[in-house]
Amino acid sequence: MEELTATVENITEVANNNATAAEKSYETVREAAEHAGQSREDLERLTEAMQRIDATSKEIQKMIFEKYMETYTDAKPGMPFFLKMKGNTVIQILEKPMA
């Protein structure tokens, strides 16, 4: 009888330890999910900010180019413009005689 009681107590203790460990694991997973959700939101905000910066940069490049074209005084009739590009940026404007 004592052996049976000891076995039942042992099983009860193991079950209680497993339940405690499961609760701790659940809490850890819940916290990780919470952090992952926050990280996802942060990443979305960062992506949106980068897209706004890119759009603003393109608009500024366009305004600079338009301003340059307004002040370009070396143009001669019959001399078409050729744009030397680096990526999406005009780095030089060339005139070449029409053939």
Image (tube, rainbow, N blue to C red):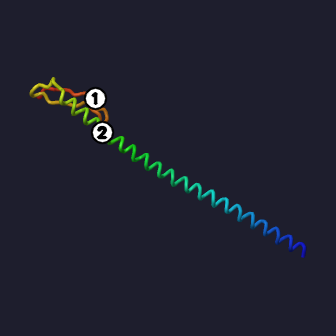
List x then y, in percent, for residue 93. 22, 28
Identify the image quadrant of the N terminus.
bottom right
Per the image, the residue denoted by label 2 is: 58
List x then y, in percent, for residue 70. 18, 30
Q: Quadrant of residue 66?
A: top left
Which residue occupies 30% across, 39% down? 58
- Under mark 1, the amino acid is Ile
Between 86 and 61, the residue placed more toward the observer is: 61
| Residue 61 in the figure: left or right of residue 94 | right
Q: Residue furthest top?
A: 74
Quick check: 98 above or below 58?
above
Identify the image quadrant of the C terminus.
top left
Q: Residues within 10 Å of mark 1 (few under 14, many from 20)?
A: few
Which residue occupies 25% across, 27% down? 92
| Residue 29 in the figure: left or right of residue 63 | right
| Residue 45 in the figure: left or right of residue 67 | right
Asked whether the residues under the numbered discs 2 and 1 touch, taking CB atoms below 8 Å apart as contact, a structural biologist would say no
